[in-house]
Amino acid sequence: MGYACCSLLWRVSQQEQAVEAMLAKSNVGEFLELVGSTLQSYLSTYNDELPSEGSEETQFILSLCGTVTNIAASAYGRDYLAKKSEGQTLINLYCTTISKAPMEPSCAKLRNFILMTLYNISLNQRGLQLVSMQPNMLGILSWLLQEETDMWNKLNTLRLIQSILTEPTSPTLIHQALELIPVSYLQQLSTNSNSDLASIAMDILADLKSFRMDTDAHMTEREL
């Protein structure tokens, strides 16, 4: 019953009007808390041996996280998630989960939903602040970019990195980007047959080059 109801909610939440109606309810905070607690329980219970994607347990957690992804896909929804304490708590949990979720294929869709949600959240200024200021966020994304085998997840990881670097919220992020994001790997991705992946990789390479030039210029000014 729980899976069936959440699956229906997931499908309904694909409509932006439905998202706005949903967020007008007083119990939305309880739903977001449910998503967070269920996600934590799912990962801690199964650890490195997750059920198959078609299992009822996995479909249940996917329907919950898929609903959150749909909420974050709307401007109203991501603003809600970035402002409300329950939404902020879930964003924090998602940021830590991407470094802990198993890399096995049965978890690929779950990682995809989490990455899509975080990318959509980053399109909101408050949300971008929340995501980019997470401890070692660029380090986690750099690791995930290299370890991820699913092409869509690799693409969404790149999109999130690009979003963070487009409007870096602090000078620290720029230094982290120069230290943690492997230029050689980005150069490899820039020739990938997937045009979206290649294009974003080239854009990030250009950003890193610009950051490095600015950093070198500042160091030269100090020496003078």
Image: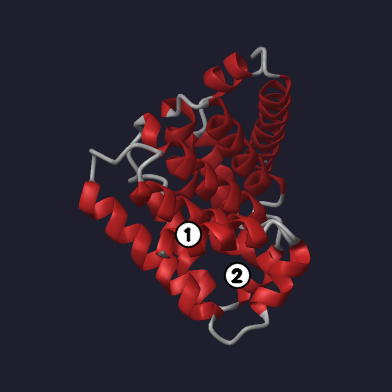
The image quarter containing residue 51 is top left
The C terminus sits in image quarter? top right
User: Callout 1, which amino acid?
Assistant: Ala
Q: Position of 221 compared to 49: left or right?
A: right
**Residue 223 visible at all:** no
Q: Is residue 39 above or below residue 153?
A: below
Q: Quadrant of the N terminus?
A: bottom left
* Pointer 2 with pointer 1, Cβ within 8 A: no
Q: Find residue 22 and report its image quarter.
A: bottom right
Q: Name the residue under label 1.
A: 4
Q: Is residue 115 visible?
A: yes
Q: In the image, which is nearer the foreground, mark 2 or mark 1?
A: 1
Q: Is residue 139 left or right of residue 177?
A: left
Q: Say whether disc 2 or disc 1 marks the residue closer to the N-terminus.
A: 1
Please state the total of marks drawn on the protein image.
2
Q: Nearer the viewer, residue 178 or 140?
A: 140
Label 2, secondary structure: give it: helix
Q: Characterize the local packing of mark 1: few (<14), some (14-19) or many (20 or more) Cα atoms within 10 angstroms.
A: few
Q: Give x and y (percent) for residue 86.
A: 49, 76
Q: In which quarter of the image is residue 202?
A: top right
In the rendering, at what x and y percent does residue 95 appear?
A: 45, 54
Q: Residue at x 32, y 59 (%)?
A: 40
Circle on res. 81 = 2
Could you say whether the residue bearing mark 1 is in a helix, strand or loop? helix
Relative placement, left or right, of 75 versus 84 is right
- Please give the name of the residue rendered at 71% of the width and 56% of the height, measured from the top-left corner: 123
Q: Which amino acid does label 2 sit on?
A: Leu
- Badge 2: residue crowd in 10 Å (few <14, some 14–19, many ≥20): many
**Which residue is painted at 45% across and 56% down in the image?**
94
The answer to whether 133 is drawn above or below residue 197 in the figure is below
